[in-house]
Amino acid sequence: MGYDVEKTDEQWRAELSPEEYQVLRQAGTERPFTGEYTDTETTGVYSCRACGAELFTSGAKFASHCGWPSFYDPKDTDAVELIQDHSHGMVRTEVRCARCGSHLGHVFEGEGYPTPTDQRYCINSVSLRLEPADG
């Protein structure tokens, strides 16, 4: 699949920390309740840690208490791509950065959260970089 940002595996390994590489490029998952943005309430924009594409805003972030940052909608409809994931004996919807194809997390629906979309984009903190709004 063609992305606006394409790099070799060696380039990604050189630019990302081992944990970032494992999550972003190998579809790993950080341990729950350990990520730097799990409970953050700072106003700003969350971008892809691999390529800098703007993905989510703090206005769509909510406290799901699931162990990872949760958002009910991406910043723009084309900011992320959704891919069916059959790994680990489950059927889930993987969320990737539409600009570079990096793994961000998964999206779930129908869980009953009081959000406008009834969706929970469950995203790894290590996949994101928060740019706080000017204060």
Image (cartoon, rainbow, N blue to C red):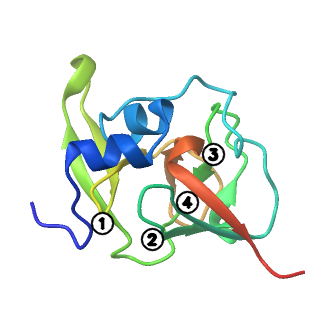
The residue sitting at 61% across, 37% down in the picture is: 68
Tag 4, which secondary structure? loop
Mark 4 or mark 2: whose residue is earlier in sequence: 2
Q: Mark 3: few, some, or many residues within 10 Å (few <14, many ≥20)?
A: many
Q: Residue 127 location in percent, x, y?
A: 50, 48
Q: Mark 1: few, some, or many residues within 10 Å (few <14, many ≥20)?
A: many
Question: Label 1 belongs to which residue?
Answer: 98
Residue situated furthest bottom in the rendering: 134
Mark 3 or mark 2: whose residue is earlier in sequence: 2
The residue sitting at 83% across, 82% down in the picture is: 134
Question: Label 2 belongs to which residue?
Answer: 53
Residue situated furthest right in the rendering: 135
Q: Amino acid at mark 4?
A: Tyr
Q: Quadrant of the N terminus?
A: bottom left
CA separation, marks 3 and 4? 10 Å
Q: Amino acid at mark 3?
A: Pro
Q: Nearer the viewer, mark 3 or mark 2?
A: 2
The residue sitting at 38% across, 71% down in the picture is: 79
CA separation, marks 3 and 1? 19 Å
Q: Residue 85 location in percent, x, y?
A: 22, 37
The residue sitting at 49% across, 31% down in the picture is: 19
CA separation, marks 3 and 2? 17 Å
Question: Label 4 belongs to which residue?
Answer: 72
Q: Are marks 1 and 2 in contact (CB under 8 Å)?
A: yes
Mark 4 or mark 1: whose residue is earlier in sequence: 4
Q: Nearer the viewer, mark 4 or mark 2?
A: 2
Q: Is residue 36 left or right of residue 87?
A: right
Residue situated furthest top in the rendering: 89
What label sits on residue 69 in the rendered view? 3
Q: Nearer the viewer, mark 4 or mark 1?
A: 1
Count of numbered marks: 4
